[in-house]
Amino acid sequence: SSANIDLDRSSRCGYPEVIYCEGKTSTALVEIFTLLLESKQRCLGTRISEEQAETVLKQFPQAIYNQVARTIRIPEKDAAFDEELTKGKITVLTAGTSDRPVAEEAMETLIWMGYEPDLIVDVGVAGPHRLIEQLPRIQNVSAIIVAAGMEGALPSVVGGWVSCPVIAVPTSVGYGASLGGLTALLGMLNSCAANVTVVNINAGFKAGFIAGLIADQQRSSSES
Amino acid sequence: SSANIDLDRSSRCGYPEVIYCEGKTSTALVEIFTLLLESKQRCLGTRISEEQAETVLKQFPQAIYNQVARTIRIPEKDAAFDEELTKGKITVLTAGTSDRPVAEEAMETLIWMGYEPDLIVDVGVAGPHRLIEQLPRIQNVSAIIVAAGMEGALPSVVGGWVSCPVIAVPTSVGYGASLGGLTALLGMLNSCAANVTVVNINAGFKAGFIAGLIADQQRSSSES
Amino acid sequence: SSANIDLDRSSRCGYPEVIYCEGKTSTALVEIFTLLLESKQRCLGTRISEEQAETVLKQFPQAIYNQVARTIRIPEKDAAFDEELTKGKITVLTAGTSDRPVAEEAMETLIWMGYEPDLIVDVGVAGPHRLIEQLPRIQNVSAIIVAAGMEGALPSVVGGWVSCPVIAVPTSVGYGASLGGLTALLGMLNSCAANVTVVNINAGFKAGFIAGLIADQQRSSSES
Amino acid sequence: SSANIDLDRSSRCGYPEVIYCEGKTSTALVEIFTLLLESKQRCLGTRISEEQAETVLKQFPQAIYNQVARTIRIPEKDAAFDEELTKGKITVLTAGTSDRPVAEEAMETLIWMGYEPDLIVDVGVAGPHRLIEQLPRIQNVSAIIVAAGMEGALPSVVGGWVSCPVIAVPTSVGYGASLGGLTALLGMLNSCAANVTVVNINAGFKAGFIAGLIADQQRSSSES
Amino acid sequence: SSANIDLDRSSRCGYPEVIYCEGKTSTALVEIFTLLLESKQRCLGTRISEEQAETVLKQFPQAIYNQVARTIRIPEKDAAFDEELTKGKITVLTAGTSDRPVAEEAMETLIWMGYEPDLIVDVGVAGPHRLIEQLPRIQNVSAIIVAAGMEGALPSVVGGWVSCPVIAVPTSVGYGASLGGLTALLGMLNSCAANVTVVNINAGFKAGFIAGLIADQQRSSSES
Amino acid sequence: SSANIDLDRSSRCGYPEVIYCEGKTSTALVEIFTLLLESKQRCLGTRISEEQAETVLKQFPQAIYNQVARTIRIPEKDAAFDEELTKGKITVLTAGTSDRPVAEEAMETLIWMGYEPDLIVDVGVAGPHRLIEQLPRIQNVSAIIVAAGMEGALPSVVGGWVSCPVIAVPTSVGYGASLGGLTALLGMLNSCAANVTVVNINAGFKAGFIAGLIADQQRSSSES
Amino acid sequence: SSANIDLDRSSRCGYPEVIYCEGKTSTALVEIFTLLLESKQRCLGTRISEEQAETVLKQFPQAIYNQVARTIRIPEKDAAFDEELTKGKITVLTAGTSDRPVAEEAMETLIWMGYEPDLIVDVGVAGPHRLIEQLPRIQNVSAIIVAAGMEGALPSVVGGWVSCPVIAVPTSVGYGASLGGLTALLGMLNSCAANVTVVNINAGFKAGFIAGLIADQQRSSSES
Amino acid sequence: SSANIDLDRSSRCGYPEVIYCEGKTSTALVEIFTLLLESKQRCLGTRISEEQAETVLKQFPQAIYNQVARTIRIPEKDAAFDEELTKGKITVLTAGTSDRPVAEEAMETLIWMGYEPDLIVDVGVAGPHRLIEQLPRIQNVSAIIVAAGMEGALPSVVGGWVSCPVIAVPTSVGYGASLGGLTALLGMLNSCAANVTVVNINAGFKAGFIAGLIADQQRSSSES
Ligand SMILES: Nc1ncnc2c1ncn2[C@@H]1O[C@H](COP(=O)(O)O)[C@@H](O)[C@H]1O
Ligand SMILES: Nc1ncnc2c1ncn2[C@@H]1O[C@H](COP(=O)(O)O)[C@@H](O)[C@H]1O
Ligand SMILES: Nc1ncnc2c1ncn2[C@@H]1O[C@H](COP(=O)(O)O)[C@@H](O)[C@H]1O
Ligand SMILES: Nc1ncnc2c1ncn2[C@@H]1O[C@H](COP(=O)(O)O)[C@@H](O)[C@H]1O
Ligand SMILES: [Mg+2]
Ligand SMILES: [Mg+2]
Ligand SMILES: [Mg+2]
Ligand SMILES: [Mg+2]
Ligand SMILES: [Mg+2]
Ligand SMILES: [Mg+2]
Ligand SMILES: [Mg+2]
Ligand SMILES: [Mg+2]
């Protein structure tokens, strides 16, 4: 087989390997998901195309496909996927409406990790009152994800209001000197707010994963 | 002579040629300023070094040297430089305390143009209440200059609160991926606020000059 | 709803939120425009595709679609859009004929703000007499917009002839080392003319908006 | 005063404003620290020069200066700074010995936040057994900081072995195409390990702050 | 003719000129291959499109086309191409499954040079045990090729385990700040492992060719 | 010896090898010049430091050192260097006064080639009448060199007025986004004037050499 | 009309304005060519698409369209275009076969200027004897154009053999770190051969035009 | 101790860990070398400063310091360092005289590995006959190192003449658009010669190490 799935990742890293679908054949995807499910791992595929999703859905009708997020989730064979999700720990914000797909990828990742994130869209800095109105929804959580394109200023502003880590995801929204998201990325890395950390351009999956791991600190400690 | 001063600029562009002192000998500077004063032009020198300033001050004791701004101003021979300045038209803001020299260069340029700008420092986005407290000082002016380094987010936030043009000046304050001010520059160019326009990194002179020209629209129209 | 329109922007910033259409569904656009019109705001949409424009026009037949500019304007319900436009305040120049779409976007923005700008195309520096012939049309205005690609030299040359702010818009016209407009952008930021300020690549909307705000300084003062 | 310290930050963000010393006069620093201490905030200064530190130490002999980290800490007036530190939550790793100063800045930040981090240096990937030997020290913590220059590969490798967030700090260690840390930064942003998040080049302070906030999730929940 | 094939290359450089097919007409390719075969050179074409391959295959049915690698090989007229290949000298590794095409191009090049390389796919650093399991297959060869995208960390890790040259090939696999392979390229150039050398992005052909030349050192010396 | 001077260059390329002095010891320079003079070649050294020049002058008192240009010229042993120079063929222009050193390097190169160039300084585009006044001095020559920093617009404007090649030399004059001359370089490469060709940043030597070779076309043809 | 053709260019610059067809409607092209022909100027259009060429050819059947070069030439109404071309003055070289279109654009430009250039293709440095064989064809001309992609080394090598200016045209041929021609461009600007000057990436037209102007120096002087 | 030397490297990678001296204290260096010598490893230190070298030499008078190369070598306690070196396997070339230090670093590395490389300096492409004269010294070796700055064309030309791997080392020699060696690096990565592989800018050590490993293929096979 051309793939060499890391079936042991769950035991080392807490969660199974997530499948990056870009550049894989649909057949390969079905093979990989079968393998993961057989070893009782819950599956997440990212950057899946409509065409790939169709083939996977045919084989696994229980799969949940999110077209905007370009993700697919498959519950493990013997487990109900609709187990109770942990609420109130994580908020996902977007600066504009076009940053939505990146936010959705983060959301799907978090649901796969067992969280139900709160979503607030279109609260960019040009309309400053919009964020102020939402402060109660961001001031008592474990982690906040902020997706923003163009100049990527929102994470700094959010960072100034909260005491938890802010995971900034630059998006490729914008034109000209936005350089496909590089401008937002550089801006976020230079945030004057000390609580802002950054992931790759459009990396909703990574932002979600980090946010989930942060919330895990509390979930696991409150569990023990 | 090695310089070819544009003595006609004042009649075409409203203000005399400003002297960029970097890379000129002190002797050349004295020559140039003498020429300008002889043709009854008020002088402004930018990016002047301490050493250059000393020589110029020896020759023109009436000159006003601002070490932080690295500027020198000399009133024309027959005119009092302390003519009445126009107040209340322009506000200069800085995000941090290190952006001060750039703000000072803008201020000196404006004074040379006959304006008395208002200055507000250190109102960066990580402490959001600081700007809100100053809103009255920025909501009734003709133009606002915002100097900011690092991610350069302040102009966007200011832009969201006002109805006049915001001239954003990126500064080279920051480190690492701030790339000597390029990150702030790119961010400002991609501002989601529609009223933000941008000048070169550390170009306090240009920001001041543009702001002055904008305020001139009203000054001249109210004069007529 | 997925959008969170800033209906209060007009009172803070003088003009309503302008809708960036790229990446929004046609349905979302209709929703947004309905909302704006209901709150008696005049609508401007930028970067609209032909397909989006068609849907919007079906719903709002009074809308004015400019295919070259990729803009759509909709007069507010109770107001005639053809109110008298303020003339003689703003000139829009292009260096070449291919910079036209960017100039058109600036023009549409200005019309939406109540101005009737003057347009002069194809006066690039390689044929220097062409600009000289037009000097009377650029020397008595409040603001000049200059759209240029390739090396972006025209704003500097224009700046040398006038006493009002020059808003330079780099365009992506060119090839090879023009780097999609970055070369023109960098050139304009380094203009040796002190009255040149810069907006993002192809940002005709922003150039128009800033020019309008500058002209407003005089319009409002002459009104009062 | 030229600074406008955000005395309210502690209540919004959990910790007081940290002072970026670069570009501030020693007098300004003493002023700022006095202000912070008067409002009962514990002080941290970063990027402090030897000369600045000397002046500050003269005024506040209780201050703790770390020359390698370029930091200074001052306990609040009425509190003992040597309160008990929380152990066992955070590990700081470096790829090489030259990444040490960045690691030290992170350590000092964490001590200021009340944590006693574990430090492991010089476990870069070219000697792979070195990391393996230290696995027990990185597999039961809340957060791991990894400082690495050159190609910045260590965070990915660490990420493959742990279930907590890995905060990657690129350093400017290297030459030629290391581009002052940009290469390490880009590499870390593209890490194939899903649990890696990134801060600015040489930003030991930020890495420490984020790690502290993550550990806070557990500390506060176990406190309640 | 528009091409000027270097028929003498084999005598100077050990192997005939390889044909870069991109941007050549199918007719030109047939002409070139005919010429090479006539002068008794074995042919290799790289970056061949499906359409080009079809035409070439029609003319030379004995040609071996690899669609994934985008290569075509044609044995010289009088020689059996299936001469015995030298085994056990070279291993080709990939970090992920999407790096496969680049690895295939290297493999095809090596087969054309008379080597039978060993292939190991999908042993990226996020699943560290996968490489460890394969150590015996990489520790007794003359040269190792490592194809990796994203942060390109695998060559450094491999370099830490072996005593032969490691030829690193950055691939364009990744998104956002992977910059089409530039990030992996820069990382590999800065590898902290001393035995890593680098070729162009996606340059499987070059990696294969260099590896073959290295193995030739031993093959030829053991032959003599 | 550590240098391997190309004594044959004069016969192949028309002029002897020019010595790039940067990074060579003064002893090496004396050795090299001795060698050149012995083979009856006239010497030109570029980028020479004051210290290097001193040593060379001690050995060859007939040498002509230009401190601003950072060049040294030595007439061949048996020839008078003050042979008659060809006039009226080449004009050198600068945009600002700080571009002078680059212009001087071009001038020295041309004198070494036997030309007496005409020099016009400080005719940048912000004062457009200055160039117009000089048109007669640029419209009847074989080649024009234009040195300019900042946005580098002058070559395009000059190109619009003349029928000979314009050799544009970007200089590193400027700050911020001038990127050490890259902005001027990119601008010149994208000149909308068809007669503009470009050399490296600050490469006065190359500009002079090319201009001389162009003028040679006419000198040699008129000689024959 | 949307274009403002510079009909006076011929008198100032020796040749009429050349039409850059990209981004112009076919109707606009016909209009422009009609205008030029009416004022008795010979037309050259560059970067013309097949579709645009078709329309133009319908209107001007005497036009000469070169599909590879993407150019169109139209003789002036009353003149025979097949006037005698000047031979033996200019040679055009390419490094590879894929650089041909750029060479063709240069050739067409030269024919339009009245020259018949000599063409030598595919003499790149990897097969060094190929250039040596052609030395007689490059050592007695007025100017040499060298089109090369990838590392762009050929102009330096050619420069080492000749005494006339070498106009280097970087092409976008290559992949990966060739960066669309930027690598070749940068290499050529840094050529260690003093007689190499550079134009924009793929700028065959500019290379041809400069070469023609250089040859003009001799043609005009031999004419007078 | 702050360093964690990889004493096992020799057994895994064939040679001991080499010490990168930049950023280490002289005390640390002495400690590290003592440790290496105690475990019977031969020491090599690179990028050592004069000051560091002095301290090390005081402690280990048998050390061999090369100031140009910035390296230090120390024979292991019980072994004679002057064991017989393997000759005739490796040639080191430089394009100019300023590339010498990088070549020296490669040479020192090779001597430490037991090789006596052949050195040829200043055979850059602008004087093409110089390389041709040296062909016999480069056509029968196992590996060739080519150090070149500016446009970095020499490796491609060398590659066209030989049948062994060419290891290209870009140097930071040059100015302006040489971008500190990036131009040479990019050029070498895009070499049209198939046998060219590349290391980091100024990385003489790496080039030497790879060349040594390649020659080892033959040395070890001829030994067995
Ligand atoms: N080493 C550091 N790196 C990045 N940001 C810092 C650092 N130290 C302090 N800061 C932040 O920088 C801001 C201070 O900016 P300023 O007003 O210029 O002093 C504070 O709000 C801190 O959160
Ligand atoms: N959207 C994503 N962005 C970044 N990394 C991902 C993404 N989805 C999966 N991955 C990671 O990419 C790796 C898979 O690479 P591959 O072997 O090419 O399939 C897995 O180890 C995942 O941790
Ligand atoms: N600080 C500054 N930044 C940018 N341009 C400036 C500055 N000061 C003066 N200038 C402009 O630079 C031009 C002078 O260039 P130069 O001929 O080199 O002295 C003048 O026309 C001024 O408009
Ligand atoms: N100022 C200069 N800029 C660029 N190239 C130069 C310069 N001066 C001399 N050269 C060229 O640099 C080459 C010498 O390089 P090197 O062998 O390092 O001394 C000569 O062949 C000259 O053609
Ligand atoms: Mg919005
Ligand atoms: Mg502050
Ligand atoms: Mg035109
Ligand atoms: Mg180490
Ligand atoms: Mg995988
Ligand atoms: Mg000047
Ligand atoms: Mg070829
Ligand atoms: Mg030399």
Image (tube, coloured by chain):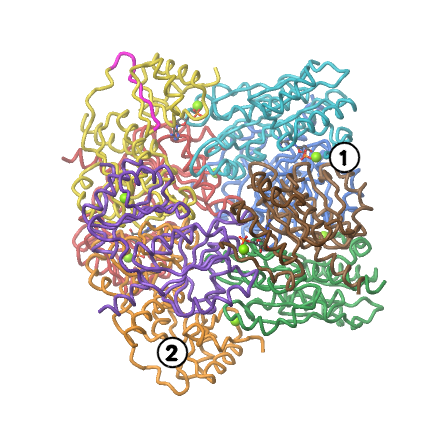
Chain colours: A red, B cyan, C blue, D yellow, E orange, F brown, G green, H purple
Q: Is residue B38 above or below residue F33?
A: above
Query: Is residue H19 or residue A111 the one in the foreground?
Result: H19
Q: Would you say residue C223 sits in the magenta stretch?
A: no
Q: Residue furthest left?
A: A224
**The C terminus of chain B sits in image quarter:** top right
> Residue E213, image x and y in percent?
36, 69
Q: Classify residue C107 by image quadrant.
A: top right
Which label is found at residue C139?
A: 1
- The amino acid type found where label 1 is placed reads Gln
Q: Secondary structure at mark 2?
A: strand
User: Residue at 53% of width from left, 77% of height from top?
Assistant: E28
Residue C66 visible (yes or no): no
Q: Are marks 2 and 1 in contact (CB under 8 Å)?
A: no
> Residue D64, image x and y in percent?
29, 21
- The amino acid type found where label 2 is placed reads Ile
Q: Is residue H162 above or below residue D135?
A: below
